[in-house]
Amino acid sequence: MKNTVVTFRNAKAEGKRLSMLTAYDYSTAKLQDEAGINGILVGDSLGNVVLGYDDTIPVTMEDMIHHGAAVARGAKDALVVIDMPFMSYQISVEDALRNAGRLMKEGHAGAVKLEGGEEVCPQIRAIVNAGIPVMAHLGLTPQSIHAFGGFKVQGKTEAAAKKLLEDAKRVQEAGAFSVVLEAVPSKLAAMITEELEIPTIGIGAGNGCDGQILVYQDMLGMFSDFTPKFVKRYANVGEVMKEAFRGYIEEVESGAFPAKENEYAVDDSVIEKLY
């Protein structure tokens, strides 16, 4: 059954938990979709786990469109949300609207996601008014990592917690259909979830959110540069892959691969005529 923004709103009302994962390519999106995931985020986290950058800052609109379109081709039932990369929406409302439109037209997104609270509400409002669904993102917003001074839990002081709660209400009023809460204390995330009519999607925000999202390479043990505390590893696919790579290398070096069953045959008479 096709997941849409209405699915997400109804899930909140009905008390159903929403599941999301990141994906950046057709094959992975297809597997997640067939497993029954509600939503797939084409995150600008591809800067870290796919492109090898230290952070998400260098990711471009072209990167997001390229990977987003691939994911959209693989996801038939999941809601595909594409991140708006750094500086694609911060400069002006016009830029935000234009770039959100590109992610829909060229990236085939079902919705876009942008980071920030009250300061980006004009952008959210304009994008939503243009008929483009928006997922908001509060708490630890990776595009602001240098301003935060690193990957740090947000909302731990009274002032910061109040700001997060107010920002959540503001993005809801601006028209966001859901909001990601990243690296937020669980009690605060649960309070925000109770206060909002739109669903919250947690990543490092505890079990009180309406749904959860993880970077799929983290939960499969495929990315080891940095593993946040909130990640649960559901399989050690990284080790399985390395073992398979080693087996391939050994068989190539020994001549065991390719074997007869991996080769194509031709009539000997054809070869004889070549001499």
Image: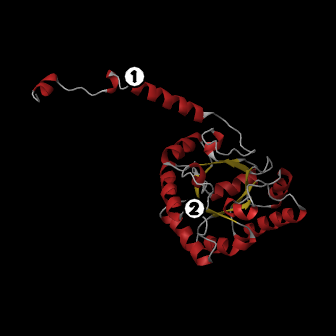
Q: What residue do we see at 45% from left, 25% from top?
A: 250
* Quarter residue 89 falls in: bottom right
Please say whether residue 107 is visible from this viewpoint: no
Q: Give the crowd class for mark 1: few <14, some 14-19, many >=20 residues within 10 Å.
A: few
- Give the Cα separation between the discs numbered 1 and 2: 42 Å
Q: Nearer the viewer, residue 54 or 48?
A: 54
Q: Secondary structure at mark 2?
A: loop
Please give the count of numbered marks on the rendered protein. 2
Q: What residue do we see at 53% from left, 46% from top?
A: 29
Nearer the observer: mark 1 or 2; the answer is 1
Q: What residue do we see at 48% from left, 58% from top?
A: 66
Report the disc number at residue 254.
1
Image x and y of residue 156, in percent: 86, 57
What quarter of the picture does the C terminus occupy?
Answer: top left
Q: Which residue is mark 2?
A: 58
Q: Is residue 271 above or below residue 113?
A: above
Q: Is residue 183 above or below residue 116?
A: above
Q: Secondary structure at mark 1?
A: helix
Q: Is residue 41 above or below residue 260?
A: below
- Report the amino acid beneath label 1: Ser
Image x and y of residue 52, in percent: 56, 51
Q: Earlier in the sequence, mark 1 or mark 2?
A: 2
Q: Is 84 left or right of 158, judged from the image as shown?
A: left
